[in-house]
Image: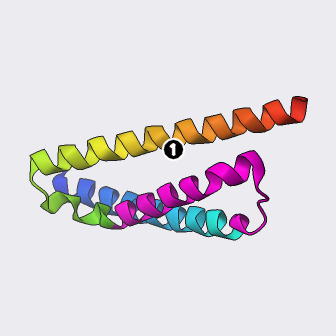
Amino acid sequence: MDLLNLNSITILLDFAAILFMFYCLYLVLSLKSGIPGGTVGKHWNFLSLLVVIFTVGYLTAPFFDQLPDDMLRLVVAAIFLLGAIYVSVTIRMIHNVIKELLE
């Protein structure tokens, strides 16, 4: 596969991911008003903040090729960490909801 073709695929994937993140941002913000307090409400603001951070990060993805390799590795490591935090908070929230439903 030549470099030009690979760059085209990368750009398409970047823009697809950006569009998907805007959809996620829309969902997280539109659901916010319908969330009562409790377990879900307690975590929702933090999850919303992470979605905003990820959306901003995805908007910068098309420019990653301009970063030096060391900086790019740092950005990827930060994305992995934030992704792991997001998954952890989501799983904990779902666990608490299931626990409350079973009580």
* Occupied quadrant, residue 94: top right
Looking at the image, residue 40 sits to the left or right of residue 23; the answer is: right
Where residue 43 appears, x then y in whole percent? 63, 49
Position of the C terminus, as image quadrant, is top right
Q: Residue at x 36, y 67 (%)?
A: 59
Q: Which secondary structure is most common in the magenta stretch?
A: helix
Q: Count numbered badges in the picture.
A: 1
- Is label 1 in a helix, a strand or a loop? helix
> Does residue 71 sit above or below 45 in this rendering?
above
Relative depth, front residue between 16 and 91: 91
Relative depth, front residue between 59 and 2: 59
Looking at the image, residue 69 sits to the left or right of residue 21; the answer is: left
* Occupied quadrant, residue 13: bottom left
- The amino acid type of the residue labelled 1 equals Tyr
Looking at the image, residue 45 sits to the left or right of residue 14; the answer is: right
Magenta segment includes 87: no
Q: Which residues are magenta?
A: 31-59
> Does residue 91 sit above or below 34 in this rendering?
above
Where residue 36 appears, x then y in whole percent? 79, 59
Magenta segment includes 56: yes
Q: Residue at x 59, y 58 (%)?
A: 45
Q: Which residue is mark 1?
A: 86
